[in-house]
Image (cartoon, rainbow, N blue to C red):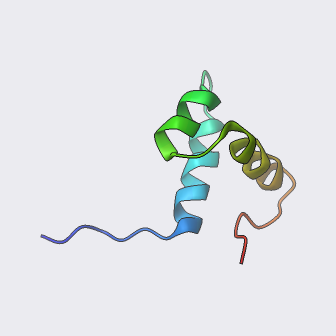
Amino acid sequence: MAWRARSVVDERLEFCRLAGLEGANVSALCERFGISRQTGYVWLKRFAAGEAVDDR
């Protein structure tokens, strides 16, 4: 059984979805996803504004 490949965009959307859950700890999620808190909050700001979370 092969591992399912996930794109960067999929990972960012998953981060934003999890951060939006009640009681979510953004700092812990940033550590889990291997990003800085500053980057995490940038992604969340873009997600909330309806912007693309893709940097391409």
Q: Give the residue at x 68% y 37%.
A: 37
Residue 3 coordinates in the image, percent (x, y): 24, 67
| Above or below for 7 versus 40 | below
Quadrant (top left/top right/bottom left/bottom right) for the N terminus: bottom left
* In the image: residue 35, left or right of residue 7: right
Q: In terms of depth relative to the viewer, which is nearer, 23 or 44? A: 44
Q: In terms of depth relative to the viewer, which is nearer, 9 or 55? A: 55
- In the image as oriented, which residue stretches furthest toward the bottom? 56
* In the image: residue 50, left or right of residue 32: right
| Above or below for 23 versus 40 | above
Residue 49 coordinates in the image, percent (x, y): 87, 54
Residue 5 coordinates in the image, percent (x, y): 36, 71
Q: In which quarter of the image is residue 29?
A: top right
Q: Give the residue at x 54% y 67%.
A: 8
Q: Give the residue at x 83% y 64%.
A: 51
- In the image as oriented, which residue stretches furthest toward the top? 23
- In the image as oriented, which residue stretches furthest toward the right? 49
The number of discs equals: 0
Q: Give the residue at x 60% y 57%.
A: 12
| Above or below for 54 versus 26 | below
Residue 43 coordinates in the image, percent (x, y): 73, 51
* In the image: residue 47, left or right of residue 15: right
| Above or below for 45 versus 53 | above
Q: Quadrant of residue 52?
A: bottom right
Quadrant (top left/top right/bottom left/bottom right) for the C terminus: bottom right
